[in-house]
Image: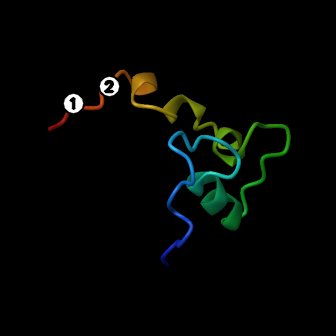
Amino acid sequence: MIFSAAKPDTRDPIGPDDPINAALRRLGVEAAGHADAFAALGLGRFRSLEHLGLDEDEGD
């Protein structure tokens, strides 16, 4: 399935309306009591490469 809304509208797309959260909502994830669907799944620690201990240019 192609998710046409996968392009963020802002440079820093973290939030309840970013493409990942929109896709998670389509899959039935509810954010009740959480900041967004991403957090509801416990994925907040993966929000950035820095949280994973990586730099953007690693892996080239």
Residue drawn where x is 85% and y is 38% of the image: 33
Which mark is drawn over residue 54?
Answer: 2
Horizontally, is 29 left or right of 50 in the view? right
Question: x, y (%) of residue 15?
Answer: 66, 42
Q: Are marks 1 and 2 in contact (CB under 8 Å)?
A: yes
The kind of residue on which mark 2 rests is Leu
Instruction: Identify the element where label 1 is drawn.
Output: loop
Q: Is the residue 58 above or below the residue 41 in the image?
A: above
Number of labels in the image equals 2
- Within the image, what quadrant is residue 40 found in? top right
Q: Nearer the viewer, residue 12 or 31?
A: 12
Image quadrant occupied by the C terminus:
top left
Which mark is drawn over residue 58?
Answer: 1
Horizontally, is 19 left or right of 58 in the view? right
For the rendered model, the colour scheme is rainbow
Q: Residues within 10 Å of mark 2 (few under 14, many from 20)?
A: few
